[in-house]
Amino acid sequence: LVLGGDLTVNGTTTTLDTNLTEVDKVEVAANNSTVGVAITQSGSGDILRLYDGSSQVVTVLDTGEVGIGSVIPSSKLNVVGGSIHVDVSGSSPAGDDNPFFATKYKAEVGGASLFLQHSRSDTIGTKVALNPGDDVGTLSFRSYNSDLSGYKTNATITAVVTGAATTSGVPSALIFSTGETNSNAQEKVRITS
């Protein structure tokens, strides 16, 4: 079937098994109160895969996990090979002007946790112990400098390895740094034990 113009299909199409090749664009324009695009996966295959050429760049598993740069996401959102940047403006709806929330719903003493982890390997998924002097992770607080040419680090909290890792633990220190008028944050307090 070759069409030279628009195609309109009214009603329900029960089976559509089609491979689109060399397509410039597929656009869905919805202007109603129902879902614009719905994908229902009744089997065990992935719900969605997006490719850049032959590289799979976005994956949605049949269990709902989303992978960006990850073919097999290991959590509800798994980002591999890049950073996550969240911008929130002052005009955001009330309560939406703080970009990160962690709420734990469980009848127990322990609260929500934020993990900063570091493996001394360039290969994702490879576990390698850190060396003395390596940073485990840093929580940085930054703001614009007076001429607005860039960010300056106001304060940091850094965990650093201070000795060789063993099977029982990793000797570490916690470093607190604060900024000065003429410099980024400098170490002020170090907790070693």
Image (tube, helix red, strand yellow):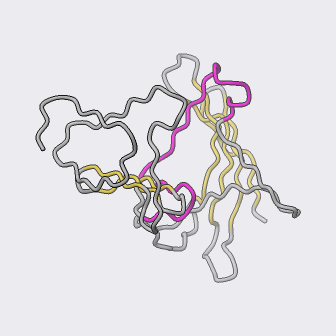
In which quadrant will I find the C terminus?
bottom right
- Above or below for 38 versus 142: below
In the picture provided, is 42 more to the left or to the right than 190? left
Residue closest to the eye, 187 or 40: 40
In the picture provided, is 114 more to the left or to the right than 128? right
Residue closest to the eye, 59 or 126: 59
Q: Reply yes or no: does residue 124 show up in magenta.
A: no
Q: How many marks?
A: 0
Q: Residue furthest front?
A: 11
The percent coordinates of residue 192 (x first, y second) are 75, 62
Residue closest to the eye, 44 or 117: 44
- Above or below for 90 versus 50: above
Residue closest to the eye, 136 or 162: 136
Q: Residue at x 76, y 50 (%)?
A: 103
Magenta span dominant secondary structure: loop
Q: Reply yes or no: does residue 76 show up in magenta.
A: yes
Q: Residue at x 49, y 55 (%)?
A: 66
In which quadrant will I find the N terminus?
top left
Q: Residue at x 54, y 54 (%)?
A: 77
The percent coordinates of residue 172 (x first, y second) are 68, 65
Q: Residue furthest bottom?
A: 167
Q: Residue at x 22, y 29 (%)?
A: 6
In the picture provided, is 10 more to the left or to the right than 23? right
The percent coordinates of residue 155 (x first, y second) are 67, 39
Magenta segment: 72-98
The percent coordinates of residue 41 (x first, y second) are 46, 59
- Above or below for 24 versus 79: above
